[in-house]
Image (spheres, rainbow, N blue to C red):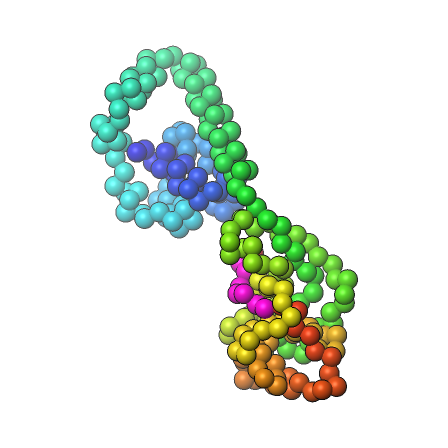
Amino acid sequence: MSLSNQIRQARKRKKITQGDLAKMLGKTKNVISNWERGDNKPDADMILNLCRILDVDPNQILDWSEDQDYAELSTLEQKHIENYRSLESWQRKSIDELILRFLDHTEEETLTDTPVIQVPFYQVSPAAGSGNYMDENVDQETIELEDTPANRKIDYILKVDGHSMEPKFMDGEYVKVKKQQSVNIGEVGIFVVDGSSFIKEYHSNTLHSINPAYSDILLKPEMDVRCVGKVLGKFHR
């Protein structure tokens, strides 16, 4: 298979559009399109970047052989190539444009047909530290996720604020949360204590800070303490 076709197929396997790949590489969409048409080829450094983004082994790229691939084509495919080579340059250009329109249309349908779900991202951060005030009517935006069994368990996403849960949850990281009113001992949850929100590990009478530099929250009868969710893990936005 040619280098151009390998780039196209690897990109589509990763469900990345030409525009998105161009942004990742600091190139224009036309450059990616030219690579996939075979009009130009990426240089050695750019091939390594492509391999990293598309999860392709560089050794595989170096071993690509168009002569070997041609021999593996069916008789009909080889006939198409021979007919194409017999065309005038303006006729080849028309065929190229038609094929690309078909391929782009198929790609758009594939990406659009991927089922997605909408998950709220709340504009308030549970504190891994001193506590952040949590209003009942916090602002939110919506994050679109692929519809999978794992993602369907996520009820909302929050951003960690503070260092008390490091190194498990770092300041500024995002966490996936499932709504529930209690968690088991040793599990990490989102808690509202007297109106302030925290991300903490639940113990029998304390909300535990993993980072030893921070104190635990001792739970007292006079406190208003609510569990508003279980932390399922990190979310990479």
State the residue in front, 147 or 76.
Answer: 147
Q: Is residue 107 visible?
A: yes
Q: Is residue 192 above or below residue 87?
A: below
Query: Residue 93, image x and y in percent?
Result: 44, 19
Main secondary structure along the magenta-highlighted residues: strand
Query: Residue 132, image x and y in percent?
Result: 71, 73
Residue at the spot 54% in from the left edge and 65% down from the top edge: 232
Query: Residue 32, image x and y in percent?
Result: 46, 36
Q: Is residue 29 visible?
A: no
User: Where the N terminus falls, by quadrant?
Assistant: top left
Is residue 37 rendered to the left or right of residue 188?
left
State the residue in front, 44 or 2.
Answer: 2
Residue at the spot 47% in from the left edge and 21% down from the top edge: 98
State the residue in front, 81 or 219.
Answer: 219
Q: Is residue 186 above or below residue 95?
A: below
Is residue 120 rendered to the left or right of residue 32?
right
Q: How many labels were placed on the picture?
A: 0
Whether the magenta-drawn stretch holds residue 231 is answered as yes
Whether the magenta-drawn stretch holds residue 84 is answered as no
Query: Residue 198, image x and y in percent?
Result: 65, 74
Residue at the spot 54% in from the left edge and 79% down from the top edge: 185
Range of the magenta residues?
230-236
State the residue in front, 61 or 131.
Answer: 131
Residue at the spot 52% in from the left edge and 78% down from the top edge: 186
User: Where the C terminus falls, by quadrant?
Assistant: bottom right
- Res 203 quadrant in image: bottom right
Is residue 33 rendered to the left or right of residue 142?
left
Q: Is residue 37 above or below residue 95?
A: below
